[in-house]
Amino acid sequence: MRIEWGVVPDAQRFLDEITRQTLVRPAEESPKDFVRLDGLSTAEQEARRLERVESGDMIGAVAMARKLYSYDLKTAKDFVEGLVGKRSTA
């Protein structure tokens, strides 16, 4: 997750304070590219989309469905929610 911080306290002080309450891990790089999907096979595109759904990244999965299939927002959202329904009943 990347956050642009433009408020007081500064980001480092905020992180110092919040680490007392929760675990804050260093940033991790994802080895997979979820942006450039055009060169992937259909199976690879579907696998990436399912990874996003399974990780709970519904916004990313909807954005991906919009890009890959030229869906409008509602159609893409319904499509992704249908995937979630299929995964939970499987």
Image (cartoon, grey):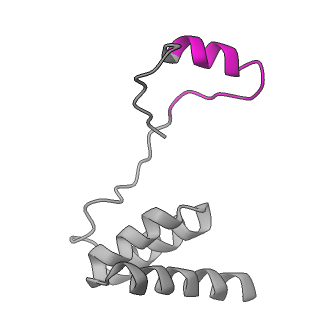
36 vs 43, left or right, is left
Is 89 contained in the magenta span? no
Q: Residue at x 45, y 72 (%)?
A: 49
* Quarter holding residue 33: bottom left
Question: How many marks on residues?
Answer: 0
Span of residues in magenta? 12-27
The residue at the far right in this view is: 21
Q: Residue at x 72, y 82 (%)?
A: 88
Give how far across and how far down residue 85 sits, in percent. Answer: 65, 86
Q: Residue at x 65, y 27 (%)?
A: 24
**Figure check: 80 above or below 25:** below
**Figure check: 29 above or below 36:** above
Is 15 contained in the magenta span? yes
Give how far across and how far down residue 1 sits, in percent. Answer: 49, 40
**Figure check: 15 above or below 27:** above
**Figure check: 13 above or below 57:** above
Q: Nearer the viewer, residue 52 or 32?
A: 52
The residue at the far front in this view is: 8
The residue at the far left in this view is: 39
Image quarter of the C terminus: bottom right
Q: Residue at x 72, y 29 (%)?
A: 23
76 vs 57, left or right, is left
39 vs 41, left or right, is left
Give how far across and how far down residue 36 sits, in percent. Answer: 25, 61
